[in-house]
Amino acid sequence: MKNLATYDLMETMRNTNQWLGATALAFGSYPITGMMPNPFFQLVSAWGEVTERSFARMVAKPDWNIHSVVCEDGRDHIVTVETEVSRPFGDLIHFRVHGREIKKRKVLLVAPMSGHYATLLRSTVASLLPDCEVYITDWHNAREIPVSEGKFDIEDYTLYLVDFLKHLGPDANVIAVCQPAPLALAATAYLAEEEPKAQPRTLTLIGGPINPDAAATDVTDFGRRVTMGQLEQFVIQRVGFKYAGVGRLVYPGLQQLSSFMSMNAEKHAKAFNEQIMRVAKGEAGDHDKHNRFYDEYLAVMDMTAEFYLSTVERVFKNLEIAQNKFTVNGKQVDIGKITSVAVKTVEGSNDDISAPGQCVAALDMLTGLPDEKKANHLEPGAGHYGIFAGKSWRNNIRPLVLDFIDANADDGGKGKSKVAKLKSV
């Protein structure tokens, strides 16, 4: 699998399907087809439109599309995305809201590196912007990073978080979503020993696999069944000639996407069939529910091979975080050294990716942290996506997280904004 031609073949197949969709759309849209009463041409055109859009999205990085936010004064304020720290494999970016005072709540969203871009958290960012200064980790697509930039594994990921937290200062509040939750915990523990004053004020871990063995899911079962040799042999490829990262070993985003889709194949097939019928009937829109979801879901990025393999081996197989044996640059990171950072875990009762029990395991590992600085919330009926971007997040979890941040602020929450008070009720 580790040859450039294999990667290019996969890209060729994607490109061909995009071309077939565009061809079908053009063919079915000829004016002369309107003279024929048979709906065949409408269906051909609709299939082409949906197919072209779907395969085109797979190689496009989505925009943030957060242009303004309504603040306490009731006015729209312009939002710009500014890079605070630029690194080869990922940046720290800030959503600057113009024309308002700087908010006391400084939030760092740690986005997952699991096949999708950080824009997967767009709605999470938008929900926090009215009441917080929001920063996020914007990870880069590995296929665009030259081999000369070197490796990037979970230790490097952890050190990136360490650097970002040093840049933000001790008044930062970290919210880590899914995959990076264990590494955000490790980065905080690393700072507790190396530079205690740079630790964040609070750490919220949402649906993360702190201890994958605490509750089995298809993800953890896969990690047990497959050997590291099998993974390296069958899923790792070299970036093809088209991209700047030519020759870099990666876990391709398209391969990850096929795994995502296969987990709920019937659901996705039904969604696309229904969308084709809506397009054929003229009922679909450019930004309808289907397109909003799949424009993001289908946009995938490659991960470096060393990051993917080290995550599977060290987090899921060897349980280094769960057993407090994780090392960075040869130095063990002791979770028990965290003594002052308030930690909250959030889980969804219907989460089939990181099942309840996996994330809350972090609290038992924090042996040096007083109980009054620990908190947990289990959201009834919520799945994985819902606990950070869905209705459960907006209506229930977000207010709880903001309250948790305020309760552990220097002023004990007395200085929180009027909007935050209203939204926390």
Image (tube, rainbow, N blue to C red):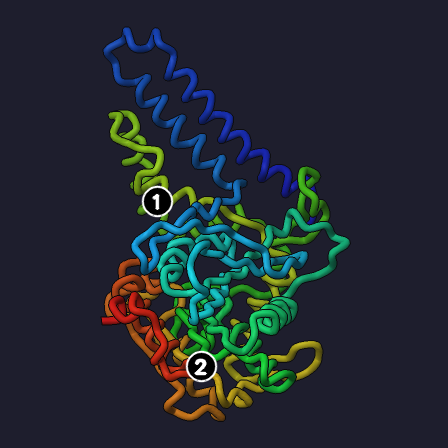
- In the displayed structure, does residue 127 sit left or right of residue 17? left
> From this viewpoint, is residue 201 visible?
yes
Q: Nearer the viewer, residue 202 or 329?
A: 202
Q: Which residue is mark 2?
A: 362
The residue labelled by disc 1 is 268
44 to 262, vertically: above or below: above
Tell me if residue 154 can be seen: no
Q: Determine the secondary structure under disc 2.
A: helix
Q: Amino acid at mark 2?
A: Ala
Residue 397 as seen in the image, left or right of residue 164: left
Q: Position of residue 414 (x, y in %)?
A: 34, 80
Residue type at mark 1 is: His
Q: Residues within 10 Å of mark 2 (few under 14, many from 20)?
A: many
For the point 50% across and 41% down, the residue is 58
Instruction: Indicate the quadrant where residue 139 lies.
Output: bottom right
Give percent across and percent down for residue 294.
Answer: 39, 43
- Please give the name of the residue rendered at 41% of the width and 15% of the height, measured from the top-left corner: 27
Q: Relative to 156, say whether 129 is above or below.
A: above
- Between label 2 and label 1, give the one nearer the viewer: 2
Q: Tag 1: Cα neighbours inside 10 Å, few (<14), some, or many (≥20)? A: some
Task: Give the SS element for disc 1.
Answer: helix
Q: Are marks 2 and 1 in contact (CB under 8 Å)?
A: no
Q: Quadrant of the C terminus?
A: bottom left
Residue 183 location in percent, x, y?
54, 72
At x 32%, y 46%, the residue is 266
212 in relation to 147, above or below: below
Looking at the image, is mark 2 or mark 1 earlier in the sequence? 1
Q: CA distance from mark 2 to mark 1?
A: 34 Å
